[in-house]
Image: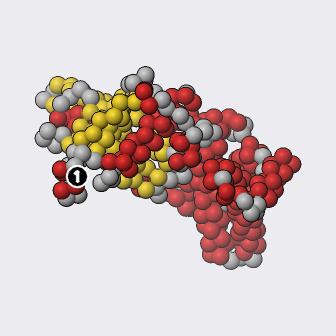
Amino acid sequence: QLSLLRTSDSVARQRLPRLLVMCLGGLVSRCQPSRGGRSFTARFASDKDDLSLSSLKQELETSQRRADVVIAISGVDSAEFKAEASRLREVVNEPGLWDDPARAQKVMAELRGFEAAEARQEKYVELAQEVTLALELSGEASAAGDEDEGRSLLQEAMALLTAWEEKVSRDEVELLMTGKFDQSNCQISIFAGAGGDEACDWVEMLERMYSRYAERKGWGAKRADFLPGDNFGFKSVDLEVSGAYAFGMLRKEGGTHRLVRIWNGKRQTTFAGVQVAPILEDATTEAVEIDPKDLEWQTFRSGGKGGQNVNKVETGVRVVHLPTGIAVRCTDERSQLINKKIALSRLTAKLLMIQEE
């Protein structure tokens, strides 16, 4: 029997973002259980006989209020927002923009944020119109005595409201992603702690958990590097996750994770450490200067698949930042020079994280 336990504040961390947004919108009442603690989606999905025009109108009003809060916080309707969006579009059309790639990438990233906010507002308006129309047609059909058509339209309105509620929930979380690197992809480094082979097994379990979470989110996840355990599992593994707000969503996973096994009536605990760092653009990392005297480089044979090159030539690199003790290793490529560049980029990202915190 396995009992998976994480740090004591993990549940609070997961619930806090949604609670904060609800408080901002004055919708604390939505955090209270209703009808046996079921949400709107689960309530109507499990009991479609409860469908009624009045209840769906109430849900429409609630979703509209939540959407209005999101729009207000993003400031889409403000004059400042519109002026800045217009300025960025003019800058993008400048002929010499890409003469400075770093500036161009920064401008494009800012413009994407403005366009995403505008698209969000347009989607809310579209959903509100579709739900309102479906409810009006349902009322007219029921008044005309066509109950089947009326119920069909109610179910259509319910599906639209469900999609709206899910989108607003995602957008509420994204509004909390205000960190400098929250929109970036990220690298998750997992390493075994106390527990021997059991800790190596725990590292493999965590990697699989994060990979499946990324898959459900529609993100990409690939194993960048790993060090196998003596018998099974991994002593360490690096997982690269790519997707919208990947770093912002996963940054709080950093820390010590523990696994408690109940075996023959005894409690056995193993530990694994997790580090999460953003994967930054070259322009960002190259702008940071690190004194070469603060770096200690080591090379080694990568081994594994790749032919004689990785098994006989020291293509793998390990760099240690002496002032902080942060170490990064890279065996991604068959070239030592490329691996050095990747390792330095990853080290720079971790140093920027420390500076931001």
Give residue 205's position: percent from left, percent from top: 28, 43
Judged from this view, the residue extending furthest toward the front is 293
In the drawing, does residue 206 fall left or right of residue 18? left
The way the protein has been coloured in the rendering is secondary structure
In the drawing, does residue 141 fall left or right of residue 197? right
Residue at 21%, 25% in the rendered image: 267
Disc 1, SS: helix
Residue at 55%, 61% in the rendered image: 48
- Give the residue number, with chain letter if any, for mark 1: 310
In the rendered image of this protein, does residue 322 appear above or below residue 210?
above
In the drawing, does residue 106 fall left or right of residue 79? left
Tell me if I can see residue 163 in this picture. Answer: yes
In the rendered image of this protein, does residue 145 appear above or below residue 132?
below
Q: Residues within 10 Å of mark 1 (few under 14, many from 20)?
A: many
Tell me if I can see residue 203 in this picture. Answer: no
Residue in the foreground of this view, choosing between 82 and 44: 82
Give residue 188's position: percent from left, percent from top: 40, 41
What kind of residue is marked 1?
A: Val
Which quadrant of the figure contains the C terminus?
top right
Which quadrant of the figure contains the N terminus?
top left
Residue in the foreground of this view, choosing between 39 and 138: 39
In the rendered image of this protein, does residue 285 appear above or below residue 311?
above
In the drawing, does residue 160 fall left or right of residue 269? right
Residue at 86%, 48% in the rendered image: 79
Residue in the foreground of this view, choosing between 47 and 321: 321
Judged from this view, the residue extending furthest toward the right is 79
Q: Quadrant of residue 5?
A: top left
Residue at 23%, 37% in the rendered image: 235
Give residue 44's position: percent from left, percent from top: 56, 57
Give residue 15's position: percent from left, percent from top: 53, 36
